[in-house]
Each structure stands twice: as C-alpha cells, then as structure tokens.
Image (cartoon, helix red, strand yellow):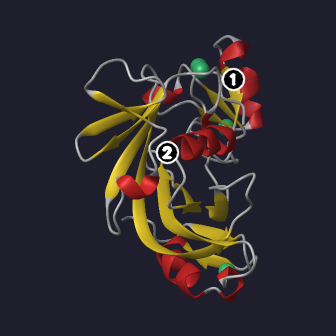
C-alpha cells in the first residue's frame, strides 16, 4: 500500500509514526496492553482518498456488528446527508436494510465473516461515492468502552494540500463542482476570486469525503 510519507498519531500513546510502520507499532504499543476493559478485537486499517492519504486504525470487538463500523465511519469521516452505505466482502454485500435475498444485513457479527489478512470495501453514498478499503491487520485484546465499542487506535495528520489554482498557498476551500477536474482545491485568496456559486465552496477537512456533496466535517 502506498502510504510512505503520511504521518499520523497513535491514540493510545500519543506518539507520531509514519503510516508504513503504524500497524507494527500498534502490535507492540504498551498502552494497548490488556486491562479490565479488554475485549478481543479485530485490528482494522481503513484507507480512502484518491491520491491524498487518509487512514484510520480501529479496534472493534470480534462480536460487534458491521453496523457499528458504519456508524463510526459516518461520524468521523463521512456523514453529510444520510446517504446509503454498504460493505462489500468476498463478493457479498452487507447493508442496513437489505433490499433482496442477495444482500446481507450489517447486523451480522464481524467474527462470522472476517479473517486475519482479509481485505474488504465500504461505500458511502451510491451517487457521489466515497469508497474505503479495509484490511484485517490482526486480532488482539484492546481496552474498548462498552458504550462505544469501536476504538480509534490511530489517524493520519491532515495532509497539506497546495492551492490547485496558484500552487502557492495552502488550500483552505474546495469547490465541489470544480474538484473533479483537478482545479477545485483553493487557497483563501483564490477562493475569493472563484467564479462558481459560493454554495459550492466547502472547507478542507481531514477526510476522504472533503469537497464531496455537502460534507463540512
Ligand atoms: Zn502507541
Ligand atoms: Zn450528501
Ligand atoms: Zn491560490
Ligand atoms: Zn468551481
């Protein structure tokens, strides 16, 4: 996976690491040692973004349903206006309200479907789709909360993106209309001069859904 150079922070010990070594770090991080709240979890690596790197490491109890991951991803990265979503795993689809006998329910427990090393996909919004790739990096004990069973282990730092108009300053706004042509990420000065409706200008946020639909973080 092309992750070199993208830095992020371990949420457990607060130290920064390159994306390429984060999986290894989390397997060894002393703060992940089992405590009274420990539960057996899948360690998942989530990635998204075309050319820009956004990633999360999550610990999710093996008994938890996929809908818990759906809920977590919507909160941290995706939710704009309640679009539909689905997991695609080994040729099967898992959604919140399965449409027919071909689809499965997201309520199924992770351990019934996932195995170490498996890759699968998640899609949010079937129109302006944000597609994420997930990988099962391992299984071990992590200190999860009963109420919020998905534990954020690590997250990328916001990538610094240059203005696609002047190439000088850091991009601060994204024109949701122009971003598809590679000219939509704008610095403050270029955003003021931009000709599209101001409704199209969205903030730059640390998410693979930055600049899409009405996503503001
Ligand atoms: Zn750590
Ligand atoms: Zn939307
Ligand atoms: Zn500019
Ligand atoms: Zn525009």
Q: Position of residue 78 (x, y in %)?
A: 61, 36
Camera-near label (1 vs 2) is 2
Q: Do labels 1 and 2 touch, CB within 8 Å? A: no
Q: Please name the residue shown 69% across and 23% down the image.
A: 201
Describe the element under mark 2 as helix, strand or loop: helix
| Residue behind label 1 places its C-beta within 8 angstroms of ligand 4 | yes
| Residue behind label 2 places its C-beta within 8 angstroms of ligand 2 | no
Which residue is under mark 1? Answer: 201
Q: Earlier in the sequence, mark 1 or mark 2?
A: 2
> In this orientation, does residue 95 appear?
yes
Describe the element under mark 1 as helix, strand or loop: strand
143 sits to left or right of 55? right
Q: List the single residue furthest toward the left.
A: 91
Q: Please name the residue shown 65% across and 25% down the image.
A: 80
Q: Quadrant of residue 213?
A: top right
Q: For the image shown, how many numbered marks are present on the structure?
A: 2
> In this orientation, does residue 166 appear?
no
Q: CA distance from mark 1 to mark 2?
A: 33 Å
Q: Quadrant of residue 137?
A: bottom left
Q: Position of residue 197 (x, y in %)?
A: 68, 10
Q: Which mark is residue 112?
A: none
Q: Please name the residue shown 31% across and 28% down the image.
A: 103
Which residue is under mark 2? Answer: 66
Q: Position of residue 49 (x, y in %)?
A: 48, 46
Q: Report ligand 4 position as a quadrant.
A: top right
181 sits to left or right of 168? left
Q: Position of residue 41 (x, y in %)?
A: 54, 67
Q: Residues within 10 Å of mark 1 (few under 14, many from 20)?
A: many
176 vs 54, nearest the viewer? 54
Query: If the image is split into quadrants, where does the N terminus sit?
Result: bottom left
């Amino acid at each position: 996976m092309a992750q070199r150079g993208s830095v992020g922070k371990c949420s457990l010990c607060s130290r920064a690491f390159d994306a390429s070594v984060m999986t290894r770090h989390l397997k060894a991080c002393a703060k992940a040692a089992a405590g009274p709240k420990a539960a057996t979890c899948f360690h998942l690596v989530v990635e998204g973004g075309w050319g820009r790197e956004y990633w999360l490491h999550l610990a999710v109890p093996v008994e938890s349903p996929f809908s818990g991951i759906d809920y977590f991803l919507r909160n941290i990265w995706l939710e704009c206006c309640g679009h539909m979503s689905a997991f695609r795993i080994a040729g099967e689809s898992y959604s919140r309200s399965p449409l027919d006998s071909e689809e499965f329910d997201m309520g199924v427990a992770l351990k019934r479907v996932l195995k170490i090393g498996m890759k699968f996909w998640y899609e949010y919004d079937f129109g302006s789709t944000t597609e994420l790739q997930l990988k099962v990096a391992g299984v071990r004990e992590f200190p999860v909360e009963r109420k919020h069973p998905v534990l954020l282990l690590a997250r990328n730092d916001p990538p610094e993106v240059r203005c696609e108009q002047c190439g000088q300053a850091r991009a601060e706004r994204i024109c949701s209309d122009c971003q598809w042509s590679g000219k939509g990420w704008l610095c403050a000065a270029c955003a003021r001069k931009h000709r599209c409706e101001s409704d199209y200008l969205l903030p730059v946020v640390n998410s693979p859904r930055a600049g899409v639909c009405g996503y503001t973080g």
